[in-house]
Amino acid sequence: MLKESQNRMFQEVGPGTPMGNLMRHYWHPVAAVAELDGNPTKPIRLMGENLVLYKDLSGGYGLVDRHCPHRRADMSYGFVEKCGLRCNYHGWLFDEKGACIEQPFEEMIDPDGNFKGKVNIKAYPVEAKAGMLWAYMGSEPTPLIPNWEPFTWKNGFSQVVFSHIPCNWFQCQENSIDPVHFEWMHANWSTRLGNAEGPYAPTHQKIKFEEFEHGFIYKRVREDTDEENPLWTVGRVCLWPNALFTGGHFEWRVPVDDENTLSVSWFFSRVPHDREPFVQERIPYWTSPIKDPETGRWISSHIINQDIIAWVGQGVQADRTQEHLGRSDEGIIMIRKRYVDDMKRIDNGEEPKGIYRDKKANGCIDLPIIGKEQFINGHTREEIDNFPRDYNPSTPNRFLFHAGQPEEVRKQYEAATGVKMMDKGIVE
Ligand code: FES
Ligand SMILES: [Fe+2]
């Protein structure tokens, strides 16, 4: 149970708040690279700030204030030029660093004046990686976007999936270190949603949480596994500061403001040997629905949709003054403590956890992954056709995680892998 002020401290991400300062030390994925191909500007809200993401005519990216510093017009209606974004009201042009580089009328009237040198628009750096656009809203020196090992894997089909979640980001992230929910929310609830009364999944017998360089790892022993099982020897990763990594995919919980979160997932599927070499020209992206328009209820058929039901179910901002943490919540307690310690470090002028600055070390950052070799080495067609369980994590034949995968993306996946997709989620 937390005091109200502690709860607020975890939730508030606006400029100048302790958690806002902490989260501004990191790059966050905010859009797909392919997204700006159709429309080069996109209004976007991040950590309580209204901004516009753009790709200019030279292919450069920028992220600037939603409002023009002249008379506050909406820059998302601006148009891109060879360099930068031009306001559509009076044509002031700004580069990716926020400098005003043209003021057409002012410059004509007063060619020797330097009014534009006195005007800036708020601007943040943007970089592309793994088919996503990443934003950094902190101070300099700018760190590196971590080059996680799966981003370097070859012969894979990736896709980026967004969901707009109407609740605070912190309750989404607490779900990243919550092993016991697998048994109930995903396994047993899915059984019941599928209209079977059982059998229920093997129960968790033992769980353990460890901090490591890139976040936290949770390990578990279930009724049907032992300490030799990779669930215990390898475990799974709660990635610092706002992600989950399961092996085949990442999920980032990007704070939009104190009441909304952008869920960004990146999936990697390995093509079979007979499709190698495979190079993906364009990483597709799509937005997954979370509510059934007919019933008005949250969608429960896919794994991340089920998680989302937990997150939004806790309220727009979970009231942690009313919670009762038990033995399954040791990981939650550990990460809360780490956030508080990191906020203190920042107060002391030190860096928080998980900042990457060494280019060489950032060439490829290894992560613990159950079944890593499947993603790296792949499978023959025969192995895929005869996979011993009903679901092959590296080259799946159904998309279990988010509802509403567009047919176009499904077809691209099938063309890349030669695997025929089944049209169902986790609930059958
Ligand atoms: S309001 Fe943007 S140029 Fe005038
Ligand atoms: Fe989950």
Image: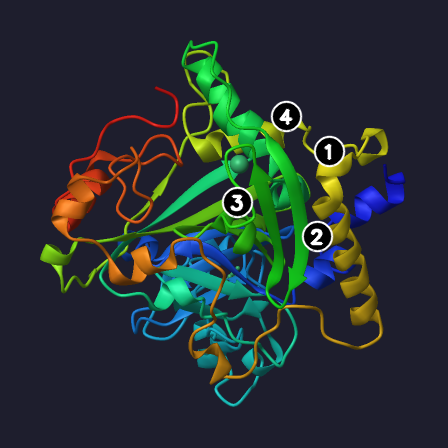
Image disc number at residue 313: 4
Hey, which residue is sitting farthest bottom in the picture?
Answer: 112
User: To which residue does mark 1 refer?
Assistant: 318
Q: Position of residue 110 (x, y in %)?
A: 51, 83
Residue 17 visible in rendering: no
Q: Is residue 315 above or below residue 345?
A: above
Distance in Å between CA atoms under marks 1 and 2: 15 Å
163 vs 424, left or right, is right
Image disc number at residue 329: none
Sequence order check, earlier mark of 1 and 2: 2
Discs 1/3, front = 1
Task: Describe the element under mark 1 as helix, strand or loop.
Answer: loop
Distance in Å between CA atoms under marks 4 and 3: 16 Å
User: To which residue does mark 2 refer?
Assistant: 13
**Amino acid tagged 3:** Leu
Discs 4/2, front = 4
Q: Nearer the viewer, residue 16 or 154?
A: 154
Q: Is residue 27 above or below residue 386?
A: below
**Amino acid tagged 1:** Ala
Labels 3 and 2 touching (C-beta < 8 A): no
User: To which residue does mark 3 refer?
Assistant: 262
Q: Position of residue 22 (x, y in %)?
A: 71, 62
Sequence order check, earlier mark of 4 and 3: 3
Among the 4 quarters of the image, the one containing residue 276: bottom left
Distance in Å between CA atoms under marks 3 and 2: 14 Å
**Amino acid tagged 4:** Gly
Tag 4: Cα neighbours inside 10 Å, few (<14), some, or many (≥20)?
few
Q: Residue at x 45, y 59 (%)?
A: 53
Sequence order check, earlier mark of 3 and 2: 2
Among the 4 quarters of the image, the one containing residue 136: bottom right
**Amino acid tagged 2:** Val
Labels 1 and 3 touching (C-beta < 8 A): no
